Image (cartoon, helix red, strand yellow):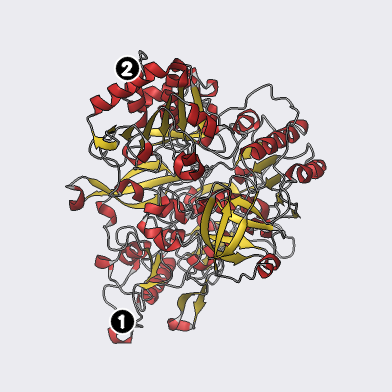
Amino acid sequence: MTKTVTLTIDNHPVTVPAGTLIVDAAKKIGVDIPIFCYHPKMAPVGMCRMCLVEVGRPVRDRATGQFVLEADGSPKIGYGPKLETGCTVPVEEGMVVRGYTEKVTEARDEIVEFILTSHPLDCPVCDKGGECPLQNLTMAHGPGSSRFEFDNKMHFAKHVPLGDLIYLDRERCIQCARCIRFQDEIADDSVLSFFNRGRRTDIVTYSEPGFDSYWSGNTSDICPVGALTTSDFRFGARPWELNSSASICNQCPVGCNLTFNTRREAKTGGAYAIKRVMPRQNEQVNEIWVCDKGRFSAYHFSESADRLSQPLIRKNGELTPATWGEALDLIGEKMKQAGEGTLVLASGRLSNEDLYTLRKLVDHQGGKALLDTHVGGGDFVAQVGLSKGSNLSDLGPGDTILVIASDLEEEAPVWWLRVKQAASRGANLIVVNPRETKLDRAAKKRVRYVYGEELKALAELKGTLGAEGNCVLFYGSEGLGLEGTTVLAQACANILIETGHFGKPNNGLVAVHRRANDQGAWDLGFRPSAEMKADLSGAKLAYVVAANPYGDYPDLLQMSHPQFLVVQDLFLTETAKLADVVLPAQAYVERDGSYTSGERRVQRFYTTVPARSETRADYTITAQIALRVGLELEGRFAPRVFAKIGEVAPEYAGMTFSDLAQVEEQWPIVGRGDMYYGGTTYENSQGLGVQLAAREGATVAEVSGAPVRVGTGLVAVPVTRLYDRGTIISRSKTLTARLSAPAVVFHPNDAQKLMLVQGMGVKISWNGSRAEATVDCDGTMPEGFVLVPRSLGMTVNHPVVVEVEKA
């Protein structure tokens, strides 16, 4: 049981866990002690001195060691001669803290005045104005007139790009080191540092390219002044002009909570437009952080000029505009004729509501419901995945985390962050991968294997996963295709069942899926097919929704196409260009819905901006098609659709949007304008989501098959990269500079044999597919293999022998 301490802060008694710092104890009872350098997610440093307080402690008799008592029997309190920093002093039993005495106020006045000798009060033109703690504290503690001559102020260059995403205003920086410490302690990317001394102290970046980190946007959130601003929002709007809408990031399976800030814009004809993306606090999911991919590509695609705006029907070999009635009537007629020959291919970009209506439609037709993914095993996750009450932040000493065949930083960055933090708290982290990944730095055990020997490596680790403590097992798809990941998932599930690590909080299996709602699709009965090429070519009618098979797998173009192809998407993709009917769908920021994360947490997103022209929600379109084949489905309101999902997924039975909107108090308290400044992350007032309960009756099953092994030659291994040049991210102008030409990674010895050098252009070919890339070298990967990003444009979904030549 946690030991507690009782103390008094400004005449308010408070009981908190031992070791709590004074500033945090004060915040718990609503007393704001101002801070600049301190942040509750990072180690205290006591640099700014803004949190100075008077601290009194019970006086002890030196001779007896007993407390000295006052006349009324209470302990006598003795105060030290100097003020103490509330961010570095832990609470003590009987301590008395005074945070607003005359002595304290004078000290804070002096600190603010000192800061303002260098910091310009340019609040009217500063992006931080309106959500800046220094602005507020200047009003509370700043002098009416400055004793410091303006000409004596230090003047630096303003709006200096630290990188492509973050700008630095050197004059505004107050040297709190929050950004540097975040990069060192949390992001594990030590790319920022102080340069020079005294009033010339400056923030500089030592990486090439500048500020080379997946987490740079968070430094702007936690900066207590307007020194760091993001390239997409600077000079874009004032905080008080913005409206807020809660959402969920749809870039990966983590399910990070976001807030979209909107404002009416002339460019949209007075309609609301998204101005910036901010993290929304959810300590069970993303805490208060979000990666740069989620921040800078979460909505830009929805504003792209090449969005589909109206239905298209193929006439005389050309796609021509049509009305919704014409398009839906034609699809309904063809679907009646197709009957059991109907195939639905969907992706995890869709919401649970969309997937439900598609599943009901395909069941009505007696057809197939396929999921576009290369990661198998989602049904095992449904059986032994994380269950209600799980939180990666609870993992620590005595617990085990095993990550196999996944580079979490590239595939699910926030999971990488939270797993790394669990290891720093004492969890036993085991990383199993053929090559070195960044997560290796935090691991207590690192296991290497040759691609194709995943099951052997896993079996050798079984003895390390005892019944004691908790165990979470992440499996990915590095070097594996659909069949390989399915086999690996079964083996992982078996180990968890045999050791009893399932069906209880903080234990279970997590699939590192490709998309945000892949697990939701598995829950609703969609399954990937190893014979997708044959399934597509043999379908009488293929209804492809939010998927681009002919773009992702170019060799499909050489095969016969479905008799009738319907594509429902945001853009005229390679698949849509082949379609007989194309239907324009709404982006997720234009409608309500829900996703189920890889941790089996169902979360809701809200409408942020009005829909474009004639687009409709995916579940609405499907319901209107269903009506034309004799099936009546709810298609107008997402909450009503969600309430019916239990019909096809029993775990969701009885769950409503109201359940997903429930909130609870979280720590730390993120006060956007408070003197206790946690950053501009939004408090979560729109819902923390609901984690699904564990299924009962999971049993060990025989592992059938094995990951694909290949013969001699240079073997290409498919890997996932964060900046993957996909349909969504490629339309973010902010991230354009990071979407450079794909790089393929060789062991230096292999590169030498092929007479290749770092940065050289090469051509890679396999089975008729060809792609160009640049050369990168990594001495930690096994020889005989080359890492190929899945977005390279080749159909490489499992290890294959390839040919390489200079470009």
| Residue, disc 2 | 628
Q: Secondary structure at mark 1?
A: loop
692 relative to 618 in the view: left or right: right
Residue 69: give x, y in percent of width and height.
62, 55
The three-letter code of the residue at mark 2 reads Arg
| Among the 4 quarters of the image, the one containing residue 745 | bottom right
Q: Position of residue 693 (x, y in %)?
A: 58, 27
Q: Is residue 581 left or right of residue 456?
A: left
Q: Which image quadrant: the N terminus?
A: top right
Q: Which residue is situated farthest in the top direction here?
A: 630
Disc 2 versus disc 1: nearer the observer: 2
Residue visible at 49% across and 64% down in the picture: 53
Asked whether the viewer can see residue 745, the reply is yes
Amino acid at pointer 1: Arg
Name the foreground residue: 663 vs 337: 337
Residue placed most toward the observer, 622 or 475: 622
Q: Which residue is mark 1?
A: 147
Which circle's residue, 2 or 1, is located before the other in the chain?
1
